[in-house]
Amino acid sequence: MNITKLINEKLSSFQIIILGFAALIITGTLILMLPVSSVSGEPAPFINALFTSVSAVCVTGLVVVDTASYWSYFGQAVILILIQIGGIGVITVALFFSIITGRKISIMQRQTIQNALSSPQMGGGVRLTRFIFIISFAVELIGILLLLPVFVKGYGAEGIWMSVFHSVSAFCNAGFDLMGDKTGVYSSLTSFSDSLYLAVTISLLIITGGIGFITWNDVATKKSRFKEYKMQTKVVFATTVILIVLPFLFFFFVDFSDKPLLQRISLSVFQAVTPRTAGFNTACLNEMSDAGRALIIMLMLIGGSPGSTAGGIKTTTIAILFANIIAAFRQKENAGYFGRRTDDATVKNASILFLLYIALAVFASMMISLTEGLPMQSCLFEAFSAIGTVGLSLGITPGLSVFSRLILIFLMFFGRIGGMTFIYATFSHRENIRSKYPAESIMIG
């Protein structure tokens, strides 16, 4: 029997998504273990290669070895390819190659792309796939051109490769950087803390990738007809603005109040954007206030928007939860925005995701803290960074044991495929029982 037909018959679309990411991770791990992938010319240890591959495919950015000083140009290119495929989506890339080779797109493939992109409808998947590739490479090319003056000026011809790498990494919300052999290992973009130009350029790339392809497709279709935008599009833009402006004001008046004005603005802008969910940083996170790091943890949990290169529970999830709170206060039956309501199933799924992500991250933090003897806040920071596929770190990840690294690997994988995908893949073949138990009230609060 044809292997593709067998997979389509035996697996749900959600299980295919998980297997697609897993296959890419394994492939990336094996390639990164080749001697040519490391600067030393020696094979990378399996756990290091696996962790790096997972982090790249899941566009996280957490690392156990410094990207620039440990991996060769070949290894860096492999990481960049994994980031690009992981950011756009394994299923999206596979469908794109089916399109350009003229293969017929089956109903199962259309359903899989719908679930992979969190698209509200199955139709238009082929057109949406083309749109994703066009906007991705167009934005990344613009990013490369904008970054060239910065990196070429500072690092000559090598700056071209650095511009390409950082543009793709930023748009895909990955957070991998190549500054380790220039400004110190794991230094990220801290040497550019006073560069407002770089902060704004990288931030715009992060925001563009984190908004989501479904949202940009709606904008491209309806252009300036704002009233015709879908409720999701309006919610995504409104929530994104709020989640940038409020953290910016906090960082501006609290953590960076002692900096010169331009550097203060640059640091505040970047730290407001990067936790959702890019992983670059221009400030030393260990020198920030406890309140500042707590705010970053909350932003890492929220992440970007549905159908984007970003992770987290998504802006729409937190918006729905907030709308449900407002509806409860006002004693309204349904939550909603912009003259539209959401159904109970959406609110239920949002609540499940919120609790599931927090429970997993907190439990993982406790396990890491007990295993490594590290402060709980540091472990919480790394765990939320992993499950939110962010990549920000307080510097403890490279020194973790294999057990703790495996915990972070699971969190990154779970965070990238998405909580609902994981649930549906696990329980998709369970029998749907239509009978209901008798209802009984239970007091809340």
Image: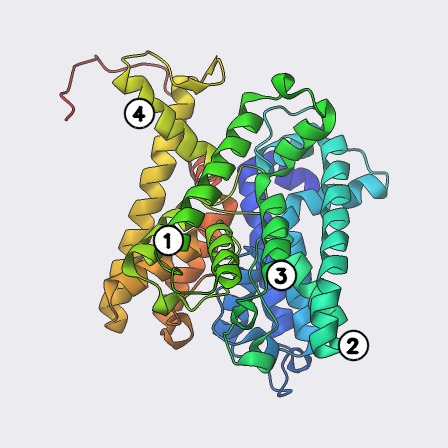
Identify the amino acid type marked 3. Leu
Say which residue appears at 64% left-offset and 17% top-offset.
228
Distance of mark 1 from mark 4, alpha carbons? 29 Å
Task: Specify the quadrant that holds the C terminus.
Answer: top left
Q: Are marks 2 and 3 in contact (CB under 8 Å)?
A: no
**Nearer the N terminus, badge 3 or badge 1?**
3
Q: Which residue is mark 3?
A: 198
Q: Which residue is mark 2?
A: 157
Give me the disc on residue 325. 4
Q: Is residue 400 above or below residue 214?
A: below
What secondary structure is found at the residue carrying circle 4? Answer: helix
Q: Which residue is mark 1?
A: 253
Left or right: 333 in relation to 44: left
Q: Are marks 3 and 1 in contact (CB under 8 Å)?
A: no
Distance of mark 1 from mark 2, alpha carbons? 39 Å
Q: Nearer the viewer, mark 3 or mark 1?
A: 1
Snapshot quadrant of residue 381:
bottom left
**Nearer the N terminus, badge 1 or badge 2?**
2
Residue 16 in the image: state x and y as whole percent.
Answer: 58, 42
Distance of mark 3 from mark 4, alpha carbons? 38 Å
